[in-house]
Image (cartoon, grey):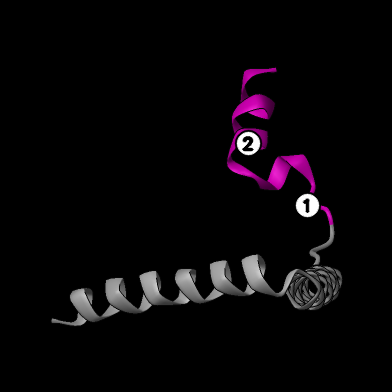
Amino acid sequence: MILIRFLINFILFGALFYLIWHFFPDAFTTLVSWIKIIIDYAQQFFTDLFNRISASTSKKEVEPAKTLLGIVFTFLK
């Protein structure tokens, strides 16, 4: 039932945007520009958030001998 409702709403939403695009092209252009601004802002926000988290949780470099491969390579020398 939920899937049918989702599909009907998806089709009606698409029809609504088609009608806006067809009969009100200036309004459609405005909507598209607003959506682009929102997407750019969200993309920049999450990129900055990821960079801040990465910078605050970055680990110091571990000496190669303390890793499993480092122990194996040290043993093989």
Q: Nearer the viewer, residue 32 or 72?
A: 32
x, y percentage for residue 60? 84, 61
Residue at 83%, 71% in the rendered image:
33
Return the x and y of residue 4 as percentages of the image width and height.
Answer: 19, 75
Q: Which mark is residue 62?
A: 1
Pointer 2 residue: 71
The residue under the point 39% across, 76% down is 12
Q: Which is nearer the eye, 2 or 30?
A: 30
| Number of numbered discs | 2
Q: Residues within 10 Å of mark 2 (few under 14, many from 20)?
A: few
At horizontal 46% and vertical 70% (from top left) the residue drawn is: 15
- 52 left or right of 77? right
Above or below, 21 relative to 27: above
Looking at numbered disc 1 in the image, what kind of residue is underneath it? Answer: Val
CA distance for labels 1 and 2: 12 Å
Q: Which residues are magenta?
A: 61-77
Q: Secondary structure at mark 1?
A: loop
